[in-house]
Image (cartoon, helix red, strand yellow):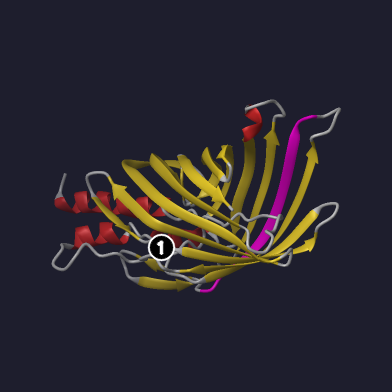
């Protein structure tokens, strides 16, 4: 294979790998706001390893190389005003992206702050939220001074952040039921919908260094059902199934450039998830889960395995 063909192949790999890092993560305080002074903290680890991706036409395509992403995520929420104000914080405090045998980047990821206010508390819960994304990650990492163009291209295709401030308005509905004589199982239901404003509708062509303007806001949603069994010991566990997604208004043509720029614009996905959360001792807990997209654009065609520790006080 000629050097030019090798460079082209690696460029394709690098652009495709960049697509895998664009799946946004949302804070999940939900409809139940916290009382003043109460708090919840979660530290979790997630890992994705795949050699396939969803292309801009929503089809699953081979990547031709293996991409591995590892992330350590810190999430917290604290009640500031009973019912009316709960604040949330979410950050990828460490993110490592690797294209096997090609290159790797690591560092701080993006951050998200949220403010939740309870509008209705009985007999159902309805909460409104304002979420603000802060671009603390590196959207254009470098391979270092003196590195060759190929190494720089690979490094730039493995960002730790999207480089863009954004915000979202979200409505969150919640209802708990069961735990009765005729139905001893306990359940909760969460339904959420939001509008995600992208403040920089731009994308960059990595090869030609061209910038394109586009409308790239998105609709977001989440549906979640949790179940707890009433029997001794197993009543420490919540079994959760969920469906979540982002539907970008960017066109497929726009997404073909956006995905290659690492800005997060144009990403679309519908994903299912399973989780088991356990109460270990007093306010301490642990959880393990899996999320995977079944319809998507510019998202890894693989599973995100997650495990975490929590504390509530």
9 vs 291, nearest the viewer: 291
Residue 125 shown left or right of residue 299 in the figure: right
Asked if 196 appears above or below 172 in the picture, the reply is below
Q: Which residues are magenta?
A: 184-199
Q: Residue at x 83, y 33 (%)?
A: 180
Circle 1 sits on which residue?
Answer: 161
Q: Is residue 123 left or right of residue 231?
A: right
Position of residue 138 measured from the top left corner of the image (x, y, whole percent): 35, 66
Q: Is residue 254 left or right of residue 31?
A: left
Question: Quadrant of the image for the N terminus?
Answer: top left
In the image, residue 113 lies at what x, y percent?
Answer: 55, 66
Q: Can residue 215 be seen from the camera position used here?
A: no
Q: Quadrant of residue 275?
A: top right
Q: Residue 307 placed where, x, y %?
A: 47, 41
What secondary structure is the magenta-colored segment mainly? strand
**Does the segment drawn in magenta span residue 195?**
yes
Q: Residue at x 15, y 62 (%)?
A: 148
Q: Residues within 10 Å of mark 1 (few under 14, many from 20)?
A: many
Q: Residue at x 23, y 62 (%)?
A: 152
Q: For the point 43% across and 57% down, which residue is it? A: 92
Quarter of the image holding residue 197? Answer: bottom right
Q: Is residue 41 visible?
A: yes
- Find out whether residue 68 is within the magenta segment: no
Name the spot of residue 248 as percent of width and height, x first.
58, 59
């Amino acid at each position: 294979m000629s050097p030019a063909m090798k460079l082209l192949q690696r460029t394709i790999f690098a652009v495709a790998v960049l697509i895998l890092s664009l799946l946004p993560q949302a804070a999940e305080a939900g409809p139940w706001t916290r009382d003043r002074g109460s708090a919840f903290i979660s530290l979790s680890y997630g890992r994705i390893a795949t050699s396939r991706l969803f292309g801009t036409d929503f089809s699953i395509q081979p990547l031709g190389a293996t991409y591995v992403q590892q992330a350590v995520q810190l999430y917290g929420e604290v009640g500031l005003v009973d019912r009316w104000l709960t604040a949330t914080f979410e950050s990828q405090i460490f993110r490592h992206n690797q294209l096997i045998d090609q290159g790797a980047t690591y560092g701080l990821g993006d951050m998200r702050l949220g403010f939740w206010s309870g509008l209705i508390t009985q007999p159902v819960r309805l909460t409104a939220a304002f979420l603000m994304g802060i671009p603390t990650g590196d959207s254009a990492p470098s391979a270092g001074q003196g590195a060759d163009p190929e190494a720089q291209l690979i490094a730039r295709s493995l960002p730790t952040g999207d480089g863009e401030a954004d915000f979202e308005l979200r409505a969150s509905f919640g209802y708990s039921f069961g735990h009765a004589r005729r139905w001893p199982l306990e359940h909760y239901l969460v339904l959420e919908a939001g509008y995600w404003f992208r403040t920089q509708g731009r994308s960059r062509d990595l090869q030609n260094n061209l910038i394109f303007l586009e409308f790239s806001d998105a609709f977001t949603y989440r549906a979640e059902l949790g179940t707890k069994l009433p029997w001794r010991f197993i009543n420490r566990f919540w079994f959760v199934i969920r469906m979540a997604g982002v539907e970008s208004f960017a066109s497929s043509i726009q997404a073909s450039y956006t995905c290659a720029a690492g800005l997060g614009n144009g990403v679309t996905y519908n994903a299912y998830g399973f989780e088991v959360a356990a109460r270990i001792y007093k306010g301490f807990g642990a959880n393990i889960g899996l999320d995977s997209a079944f319809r998507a654009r510019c998202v890894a065609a693989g599973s995100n395995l997650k495990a975490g520790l929590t504390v509530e006080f």
